[in-house]
Image (cartoon, grey):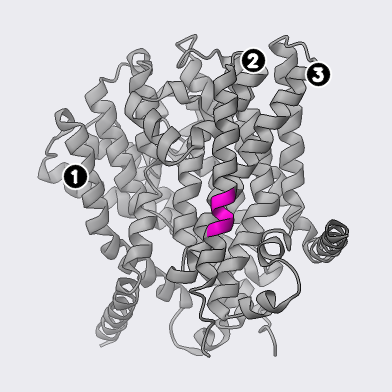
Amino acid sequence: MNLRKYLKVYKKFLHTSLASELEYKTNILVDLITAILSLVGSIFLLSIFFQNSGYIGGWKFEQALIIQAIYTILNGITNTWFNPNLTEIVKHIREGTLDFVLLKPIDSQFFISLKKINPSGFLEIMLGFLLLLFCIRINQLNLNLSFLSLSLITISCSICILYSLWFFISTTTIWFVKTWNAIEVLRSFLYIGRFPLSSFSFSLRIFFSVFIPIAFITTIPSEVFLGLSVFWKILLEIIVATIFLINSRKFWLFALKFYSSASS
Amino acid sequence: MISNLIKRKIFTLLQVQYSNMLEYRVEIALWAISGIIPFFMLNIWTNNNLNESINISNTMLSRYFLCAFFVRQFSVVWVVFSFEEDSLMGKVSPYLIQPLNPFFRYFAQHLAEQITRFPFALIIAFFFFIFNPESIWIPNLGILLLSIVSTFLSFLIQFLIQSIVACLCFWTEKASSIERLLFIPTLFLSGLLAPVVSFPAYVKSWIYLTPFPYLIDFPANLLSGNETNISRGLIMQILWILILFPLFKKIWSEGTKKYTAMGS
């Protein structure tokens, strides 16, 4: 009953935001070219790293490409859902329109996390999947059911972690009002996800797995694809994802207590 | 008389913008932090001994990336985003009436932000030296002055390119997606992520004709004491400014004729 209501509401969200985004059709084309160029650029960078050495952090070029593919998919998801919605939170809080969201007979986190959608991110997701298929071929991976389900689980966990990170920072807007630049910091840290974690020095590796779990986001799913992953790592990723999700929820409810609207 | 007037205008603008920027110290500090990607790249280079193949020692490479960080800090441009917002909000109309090109306002905004940013960049550099004490060096005065000049020229080139893109707002309303497209080649070809010397020969053959290597690679090489062709670099920077400036004036005069204020 409740779930059906939310599904129905989400359908409406999709409809309205698609309609408004499709007004800017050339923008979508430009965004597609941007996504392609950015992928070409990072493969170019990767090829510079590999031009005189066969391995980086124990990864071959073909294997490192898988990380690029997964990064591109996740980046597409970020651009489709997280970025447009969570930048909207900042606006809601600054202008005080969060009041209207809180008054609606619907979960506020659901509303502000899924209200908007940016269709140009879809193209990036597809681009990532194409690269992933290509990687599966050149690495001669054979697909079977357990492998597919494991990779699906780890990628969904990555999405959860990513969402929580974005949501954490956007929630802090309630205290700091302007958090655009905090999002920029997160973005620049996430950039690390394009490279295998083992290619960094020990201290950075610790930093990126304990403080900001970027390591979990792309490296573990890629290891699953290559059949290199160990069971405890996958389990750890699931635990981290659950902790992040639960805490993002708690943090939102906690932050709402401090929300004092604007100019009232 | 006239020069005195211009001087007074510029000073007032700078003063206003500087006090404006000082209000957002935390923002600017965060922004400075978001520029630390070159240090992550340095970590990949040295941790995998990739620099041996391009004949740059660890110390020289770390100086290069530190300088790349500095040059980037003082050549960040966001005119498009400010101008797009102002033009969508209709704020450009009052600016157009004033006897001063609105881009002077943005120019002063950028300079003021750079002054505010300077201490934060120094703090980050200080931490960098704590972790890499062997890379401490003192450039001689002439080189220091030359690299400040070339960083400023790099900033001018980017400011002009973005202003040209910003003027597209008169036609398309959303010019920021074009800017994001242009940012991709800037990111990968300017030397922020990998020094241009390390690029494969098929890229090196044409890249020095484009403006990209003069944005970060050239000033960073100059300041860090790595090998570079000083006269060619400065000449190319000035040449690009001479090409871009008339282009900007042209598109500005065309655009203002086209301008129709929002909401009127």
Q: Which mark is residue B126?
A: 1
Q: Label 2 vs label 3: CA separation?
A: 15 Å
Determine whether the residue tagged by mark 1 lies in a helix, strand or loop.
helix
Highlighted magenta segment, given as a residue range: A246-250
Marks 2 and 3, the one that precedes in the sequence: 3
State the SS at label 2.
helix
Give the residue number, with chain letter if any, for mark 3: A145
Q: Amino acid at mark 1?
A: Phe
Q: Along the horizontal axis of the image, is B259 left or right of B226?
A: right
Which quadrant of the figure contains the N terminus of chain A? bottom right
Q: Which mark is residue A161?
A: none
- Of circles 2 and 3, which is in front? 3
Q: Quadrant of residue A133?
A: top right
Q: Is residue B157 above or below residue A228?
A: below
In the image, what residue occupies the spot 57% across and 86% down? B93
Q: Is residue B21 above or below residue B12?
A: above
The chief SS type of the magenta part is helix
| Mark 2 lies on residue | A226
Of A67 and B63, nearer the camera is: A67
